[in-house]
């Protein structure tokens, strides 16, 4: 593919590593005969490093052998998680930063998207909003609503986040997985 075909979310091969495009902009030439420049910001899926690179519009760029597959979280095994590809029923053990960033949103049986590169999982994408149970929080405060008040809550998976003062332990809430914030009651 040409550099002018780059789009946000596309996964390319750059320096022998899969990289997902975060942002793309084009810059028109100032002189006649000049090439249009394509500026791309992308993240290396192996290392997490964010890179900026400028390509000429005619440059060839290789697409990575990358596939997004439906998957399921099976269980936690120490500091890694075991996931299953729902199409092939193949199981993957994933640890490190890839697993650590999403483990607070995963319950046994949770479905998510697996990013597979060369038969290895390099990304885990949970749903944008997940339902979790509030396991611990301070008691609800009555008639203290002069302004929006929040309090810390611990969810069933162990993550901590700020929730409205009216919530109590035992309630199910919706949590945004991108920003780790309260959305609503479930």
Image: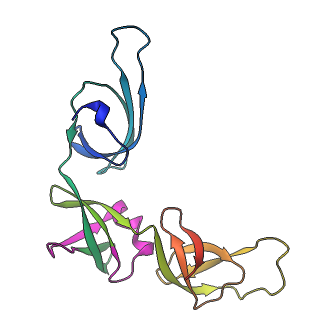
Q: Position of residue 65 (x, y in %)?
A: 17, 50
Q: Residue at x 35, y 42 (%)?
A: 7
Q: How many marks?
A: 0
Q: Is residue 74 above or below residue 41?
A: below
Q: Is residue 96 magenta?
A: yes
Where residue 88 sits: x, y (%)? 14, 72
Please tell me which residue is depicted at 24% across the width and 31% down the height of the picture: 2
Image coordinates of residue 163 in percent, x first then y, are 65, 75
Based on the displayed image, in which of its 4 quarters is residue 171 positioned? bottom right
Q: Quadrant of residue 124?
A: bottom left
Q: Is residue 183 left or right of residue 29?
A: right
Task: Identify the residue at image location x=37%, y=8%.
Answer: 32
Queried whether the magenta region covers residue 120, the answer comes back as no
State which region is magenta.
85-111
In which quadrant of the rendered image does the C terminus lie? bottom right
User: Which colouring convention does the figure follow?
Assistant: rainbow
Q: 134 or 69: which is nearer to us?
A: 69
- Judged left or right of residue 51, residue 139 is right
Say above or below: 98 vs 165. Answer: above
> Where does the image place residue 98, in percent across and percent down from the top left?
34, 61
């Amino acid at each position: 593919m040409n550099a002018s075909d780059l789009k946000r979310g596309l996964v390319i091969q750059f320096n022998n590593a899969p990289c997902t495009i975060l942002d793309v902009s084009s810059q028109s030439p100032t002189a006649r005969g000049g090439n249009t420049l394509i500026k791309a910001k992308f993240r290396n899926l192996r290392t997490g490093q964010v890179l900026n690179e400028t390509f000429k519009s005619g440059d060839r760029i290789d697409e990575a052998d990358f596939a997004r597959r439906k998957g399921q979280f099976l269980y936690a095994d120490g500091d890694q998680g075991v996931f299953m590809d729902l199409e092939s029923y193949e199981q993957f053990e994933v640890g490190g930063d890839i697993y650590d960033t999403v483990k607070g949103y995963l319950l046994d049986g949770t479905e998510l998207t697996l990013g597979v590169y060369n038969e290895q999982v390099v990304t885990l994408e949970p749903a944008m909003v997940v339902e979790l149970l509030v396991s611990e929080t301070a008691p609800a405060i009555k008639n203290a609503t002069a302004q929006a008040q929040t309090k810390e809550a611990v969810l069933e998976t162990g993550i901590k986040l700020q929730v409205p003062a009216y919530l109590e332990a035992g309630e199910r809430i919706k949590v945004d997985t991108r920003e780790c914030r309260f959305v609503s009651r479930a």
